[in-house]
Image (tube, rainbow, N blue to C red):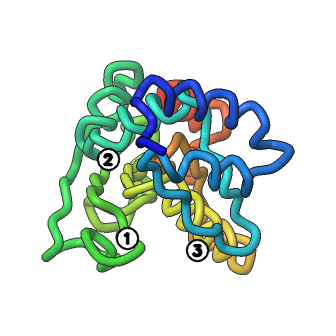
Amino acid sequence: MPDPTPQECLMHTSRRAASALVGLSSAMAGVSGCGIDPAPPAAPGVSSLAPSAAAETTQAATETRSAEEVFGDLAKTIDSAKLVKTYTEDDDPNKLLGRPNGYTSKVAFSDSRIAKKDLEFTESDAIERGGSVEVYPDAEGAKQRADYIQTIGKSSSALANEYDYLKGPILVRVTGILPPSKAKDYQVALG
């Protein structure tokens, strides 16, 4: 039997995708002859279903943006936010930049709505002064980091008192010094 044409593969894949919810394994076996390798099994607790095309497009566009570019967009909406530092692998305080399970880029920012008295004895790039933007290779990495930070915050409210806003592989960390109504400006600007 000759190999199917690309059009036949596409039609076959479309029909099979419709039945994927009923029988994902048969759908993957049915397209393997079209040169499409089935996805490896997902880790326990992780869905192996692919996101929608719109979600893939949004995530792909977000993945190519750096933390500095993301911050630039935030600053267009939030006049009080100012870029303080773009981190490198040599000066990243968390030692996560470019490392396994870490972010691909990170910046720190300040927010002039925070009273100077609340900033005594903090470093110029401290989260307390405004926040940071961290961009990960994927959405799961950003979510794991946000979950980790929030777990620390629950055990010690003095440490890691912050708001965390996620959008795909982007994590925007905002100081807990800002009241919720002002911190929410970052969530709205992130989209």
Residue at image location 29% in from the left, 56% down from the top: 106
Earlier in the chain: of badge 3 and badge 2, it is 2
Residue at image location 44% in from the left, 29% down from the top: 57
| Secondary structure category for the residue under label 2 | strand
Horizontal placement of 157 versus 99: left or right?
right
Residue at image location 30% in from the left, 79% down from the top: 95
| Secondary structure category for the residue under label 3 | loop
User: Could you give the CA–CA distance between mark 3 and mark 1, rounded to whole angstroms?
Assistant: 21 Å
Of circles 3 and 1, the one toward us is: 1
Is there any visible trace of residue 173 in the rendered image?
no
Q: Where is residue 50, by image quadrant?
A: top right
Q: Name the residue under label 3.
A: 159
Residue type at tag 2: Phe
Residue at the outermost top position = 77
Q: Name the residue under label 1.
A: 102
Earlier in the chain: of badge 1 and badge 2, it is 1
Residue 69 against residue 91 in the figure, above or below: above
User: Could you give the CA–CA distance between mark 1 and mark 2, rounded to whole angstroms?
Assistant: 19 Å
Residue type at tag 1: Gly
Q: Mark 2 points at which residue?
A: 109
**Residues packed near mark 3 inside 10 Å, few (<14), some (14 to 19) or many (20 plus):** few
> How many numbered discs?
3
User: Which of 136/75 is in front?
Assistant: 136
Q: Where is residue 126, by image quadrant?
A: bottom left
Earlier in the chain: of badge 3 and badge 1, it is 1
Horizontal placement of 123 versus 56: left or right?
left
